Amino acid sequence: MSDKSEWYVHVSTVGHLTHTISDPRMSSWNVGPHWFRGGREEIFALFEKGDLIICLQDLRIPENKVESVKIELHALFPRKRPTADRSIAVTTKTKNGGYLHIINLYQFTANDGGQQDVVWKRIHAWISRHPGERVILIADMNCSIPGGRHNYTHPMERSSAEADDRLAKFCDNSKGTILSPVEFTWKRGEKLAKLDHDISWIFPLATPRAVFNDTAH
């Protein structure tokens, strides 16, 4: 199978979320096992659409290539500001003088519950330090919502249920509003799951869609 064919097999099973804030869109995408180089053309095509914010997760850029990738992105898309880490918060001042915070998160997997707990606690503490401010968390959360898994029998089924419970508790404790796409965003064989979600605070959002190149999966 060619690299291109493998890529399209992958994107047919890993969702990409798009969101509308008035007119501008935000996109979130777990690039996954194809890494940055493997999905380079598709990533650049996403950039060229002009979305206001693009949150990519699991790029797997080798450490010695991070700076060269940043330089390349800046040269091709000078209005984009690339940042990298498991979770990143970007803040912008709005026209009315308030603040809007965007958090991009790539949560640990369900079998790493201790690390998931650490991430949720840190983000909750961060939210608590910004009372009354608008926040949007965009993420591959590796957790699902009630009814968000289908045919999901797995050796880690208990871990998955515990991960889903952590997500629900985080939303309850932080008073965040979670939004999930109608479509499943992860597929492996007969197993389907919604693992990509948005959570917002004091900022109403439209329901996201799981798409790739404007085609719903």
Image (tube, grey):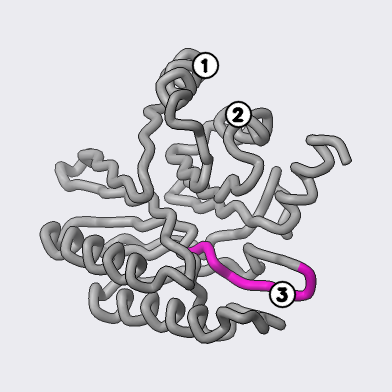
For marks 1 and 2, the one nearer the N-term is: 2
* Residue 194 covered by magenta stretch: yes
Q: Are marks 1 and 2 in contact (CB under 8 Å)?
A: yes
- Marking on residue 44: 2
Residue under pointer 3: 191
**Gap in angstroms between the C-alphas marked 2 and 3:** 30 Å
In the structure shown, which secondary structural element does the residue marked by tag 1 occupy?
helix
Name which residue type carries label 3: Lys
Residue under pointer 1: 76
Q: Nearer the viewer, residue 132 or 146?
A: 146
- Crowdedness near tag 2: few (<14), some (14–19) or many (≥20) residues, C-alpha within 10 Å: few
In the structure shown, which secondary structural element does the residue marked by tag 2 occupy?
helix
**Gap in angstroms between the C-alphas marked 3 and 1:** 38 Å
For marks 3 and 1, the one nearer the N-term is: 1
Q: Are marks 2 and 3 in contact (CB under 8 Å)?
A: no
In the structure shown, which secondary structural element does the residue marked by tag 3 occupy?
strand
- Marking on residue 66: none
Circle 3 or circle 1, nearest the eye: 3
Residue 135: x and y, percent?
28, 56
* Vertical relation: 188 (above or below) 78: below
Magenta region, residue range:
189-197
* Residue 12 shown left or right of residue 131 in the figure: right
Residue 142: x and y, percent?
49, 66
